[in-house]
Image: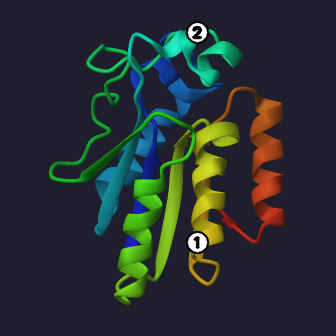
Amino acid sequence: MKVLVVIDCQNDFIDGTLPAFKAVSMIEYLKNKIKNFKQEVVYTMDTHDENYLNTTEGKNLPVKHCIKNTYGWKLREGIYKENCKIFEKNSFGCIELVKYLEKLYNQKKLESVEFTGICTDICVITNVLLTKAHLPELEIIVDSKACSAVTEKTQLEAIDIMKMCQIKII
Protein backbone atom coordinates (compact mmCIF):
# COMPACT_ATOMS: atom_id res chain seq x y z
CA MET A 1 0.00 0.00 0.00
CA LYS A 2 1.03 3.58 -0.62
CA VAL A 3 0.02 6.47 1.62
CA LEU A 4 -0.25 10.12 0.63
CA VAL A 5 0.32 12.51 3.54
CA VAL A 6 -1.07 16.03 3.28
CA ILE A 7 0.58 18.33 5.81
CA ASP A 8 -1.29 21.39 7.17
CA CYS A 9 -3.18 22.56 4.06
CA GLN A 10 -5.17 24.96 6.17
CA ASN A 11 -6.59 28.35 5.27
CA ASP A 12 -4.20 30.33 7.50
CA PHE A 13 -1.22 28.88 5.61
CA ILE A 14 -2.72 29.46 2.18
CA ASP A 15 -4.07 33.00 2.27
CA GLY A 16 -4.67 33.69 5.95
CA THR A 17 -2.53 34.98 8.80
CA LEU A 18 0.63 33.03 7.81
CA PRO A 19 0.52 32.46 4.04
CA ALA A 20 3.28 30.33 2.54
CA PHE A 21 5.07 31.35 -0.65
CA LYS A 22 3.04 30.31 -3.71
CA ALA A 23 0.57 28.29 -1.60
CA VAL A 24 -2.40 29.66 -3.53
CA SER A 25 -0.93 28.63 -6.89
CA MET A 26 0.11 25.18 -5.62
CA ILE A 27 -3.24 24.23 -4.15
CA GLU A 28 -5.05 23.26 -7.39
CA TYR A 29 -2.23 20.88 -8.30
CA LEU A 30 -2.51 19.30 -4.84
CA LYS A 31 -6.31 19.01 -5.02
CA ASN A 32 -5.96 17.15 -8.31
CA LYS A 33 -3.27 14.87 -6.88
CA ILE A 34 -5.48 13.98 -3.89
CA LYS A 35 -8.51 13.40 -6.11
CA ASN A 36 -6.58 11.00 -8.35
CA PHE A 37 -4.71 9.16 -5.57
CA LYS A 38 -6.36 5.73 -5.37
CA GLN A 39 -4.88 4.59 -2.07
CA GLU A 40 -4.92 5.96 1.48
CA VAL A 41 -4.69 9.70 2.11
CA VAL A 42 -4.01 11.06 5.62
CA TYR A 43 -3.86 14.63 6.87
CA THR A 44 -2.21 16.65 9.59
CA MET A 45 -3.65 19.86 10.95
CA ASP A 46 -1.69 22.45 12.86
CA THR A 47 -3.89 23.02 15.91
CA HIS A 48 -3.49 25.73 18.52
CA ASP A 49 -5.69 27.36 21.14
CA GLU A 50 -6.10 30.92 22.38
CA ASN A 51 -3.03 30.43 24.62
CA TYR A 52 -0.77 30.06 21.54
CA LEU A 53 1.21 33.29 22.11
CA ASN A 54 2.31 31.96 25.53
CA THR A 55 3.82 28.78 24.06
CA THR A 56 7.45 28.43 23.00
CA GLU A 57 6.38 28.46 19.35
CA GLY A 58 4.18 31.50 19.95
CA LYS A 59 7.04 33.40 21.55
CA ASN A 60 9.28 32.65 18.56
CA LEU A 61 6.54 33.15 15.96
CA PRO A 62 4.12 35.65 17.53
CA VAL A 63 1.37 35.34 14.91
CA LYS A 64 -1.86 33.64 15.99
CA HIS A 65 -2.74 30.97 13.45
CA CYS A 66 -4.67 27.73 13.13
CA ILE A 67 -6.69 28.39 16.29
CA LYS A 68 -8.98 25.37 16.61
CA ASN A 69 -12.46 25.74 15.10
CA THR A 70 -11.67 29.02 13.31
CA TYR A 71 -11.83 29.49 9.54
CA GLY A 72 -8.01 29.68 9.40
CA TRP A 73 -7.70 26.30 11.14
CA LYS A 74 -9.91 24.49 8.63
CA LEU A 75 -8.52 22.52 5.72
CA ARG A 76 -8.85 24.34 2.41
CA GLU A 77 -12.11 23.52 0.64
CA GLY A 78 -11.62 20.64 -1.78
CA ILE A 79 -8.54 19.27 0.00
CA TYR A 80 -10.20 16.76 2.31
CA LYS A 81 -11.08 13.35 0.89
CA GLU A 82 -14.07 11.72 2.58
CA ASN A 83 -13.43 9.21 5.41
CA CYS A 84 -9.68 9.85 5.69
CA LYS A 85 -7.67 10.10 8.91
CA ILE A 86 -6.78 13.51 10.30
CA PHE A 87 -4.02 13.94 12.88
CA GLU A 88 -4.16 17.18 14.85
CA LYS A 89 -0.80 18.41 16.11
CA ASN A 90 0.31 21.35 18.24
CA SER A 91 3.91 21.25 17.08
CA PHE A 92 5.85 20.96 13.82
CA GLY A 93 6.06 17.17 13.93
CA CYS A 94 3.26 14.66 14.42
CA ILE A 95 4.28 11.64 16.47
CA GLU A 96 0.81 10.07 16.02
CA LEU A 97 1.25 10.18 12.24
CA VAL A 98 4.64 8.47 12.47
CA LYS A 99 3.26 5.81 14.84
CA TYR A 100 0.42 5.15 12.39
CA LEU A 101 2.84 4.78 9.46
CA GLU A 102 5.09 2.57 11.60
CA LYS A 103 2.13 0.31 12.45
CA LEU A 104 1.28 -0.10 8.75
CA TYR A 105 4.93 -0.77 7.93
CA ASN A 106 5.32 -3.38 10.68
CA GLN A 107 2.17 -5.13 9.42
CA LYS A 108 3.86 -5.30 5.99
CA LYS A 109 1.11 -3.11 4.54
CA LEU A 110 3.15 -0.02 3.64
CA GLU A 111 5.47 0.10 0.63
CA SER A 112 5.92 3.88 0.36
CA VAL A 113 4.74 7.18 1.74
CA GLU A 114 4.52 10.44 -0.20
CA PHE A 115 4.50 13.81 1.53
CA THR A 116 2.88 17.03 0.32
CA GLY A 117 1.76 20.24 2.00
CA ILE A 118 2.71 23.38 3.87
CA CYS A 119 5.28 24.55 4.98
CA THR A 120 7.99 22.56 3.22
CA ASP A 121 10.69 24.17 5.36
CA ILE A 122 8.97 23.67 8.73
CA CYS A 123 6.27 21.02 9.15
CA VAL A 124 6.78 19.00 5.96
CA ILE A 125 10.52 18.50 6.49
CA THR A 126 10.00 17.76 10.20
CA ASN A 127 7.49 14.99 9.48
CA VAL A 128 9.53 13.60 6.59
CA LEU A 129 12.65 13.32 8.76
CA LEU A 130 10.72 11.92 11.74
CA THR A 131 9.37 9.23 9.43
CA LYS A 132 12.84 8.58 8.00
CA ALA A 133 14.27 8.22 11.52
CA HIS A 134 11.60 5.69 12.52
CA LEU A 135 11.39 3.84 9.20
CA PRO A 136 14.80 4.10 7.51
CA GLU A 137 14.06 1.36 4.95
CA LEU A 138 10.70 2.77 3.83
CA GLU A 139 10.61 4.61 0.51
CA ILE A 140 9.78 8.22 1.35
CA ILE A 141 8.84 10.61 -1.43
CA VAL A 142 8.19 14.35 -1.45
CA ASP A 143 6.30 15.95 -4.33
CA SER A 144 7.95 19.37 -4.43
CA LYS A 145 5.23 20.72 -6.75
CA ALA A 146 2.65 19.89 -4.07
CA CYS A 147 4.54 21.71 -1.32
CA SER A 148 4.95 25.34 -0.38
CA ALA A 149 7.49 26.94 1.99
CA VAL A 150 7.77 30.28 3.76
CA THR A 151 9.96 31.66 0.96
CA GLU A 152 11.25 30.46 -2.40
CA LYS A 153 14.76 30.25 -0.92
CA THR A 154 13.71 28.10 2.03
CA GLN A 155 11.68 25.85 -0.33
CA LEU A 156 14.86 25.07 -2.27
CA GLU A 157 16.92 24.65 0.91
CA ALA A 158 14.40 22.24 2.46
CA ILE A 159 14.28 20.18 -0.73
CA ASP A 160 18.11 20.04 -0.82
CA ILE A 161 18.27 18.93 2.83
CA MET A 162 15.72 16.18 2.23
CA LYS A 163 17.68 14.98 -0.82
CA MET A 164 20.80 14.78 1.37
CA CYS A 165 18.81 12.62 3.79
CA GLN A 166 17.97 10.16 0.97
CA ILE A 167 14.41 11.30 0.43
CA LYS A 168 13.14 10.87 -3.14
CA ILE A 169 12.07 14.25 -4.56
CA ILE A 170 9.68 14.36 -7.50
In-image side of 164 versus 14 (left or right)? right
Secondary element at image label 1: helix
Task: Categorize mark 1 by other alpha carbons within 10 Å: few (<14), some (14-19), many (20+).
Answer: few
* Residue underneath mark 1: 134
Q: Residue at x 42, y 20 (%)?
A: 66
Front residue of this view, candidates 28 and 13: 13
Residue type marked 1? His
Work out whether mark 1 precedes mark 2 in sequence or the reverse, and give the earlier one. 2
Residue type marked 2? Val
* Residue underneath mark 2: 63
Q: As drawn, which residue projects farthest toward the bottom?
A: 108
Q: Residue at x 62, y 27 (%)?
A: 22
Asked which quadrant contains residue 139, the reply is bottom right
* In the depicted structure, whether residue 121 falls above or below residue 2: above
Asked which quadrant contains residue 23, the reply is top right
- Where residue 76 appears, x then y in whole percent? 34, 28
Q: Residue at x 83, y 33 (%)?
A: 153
Task: Categorize mark 2 by other alpha carbons within 10 Å: few (<14), some (14-19), many (20+).
Answer: few
Asked which quadrant contains residue 101, the reply is bottom left
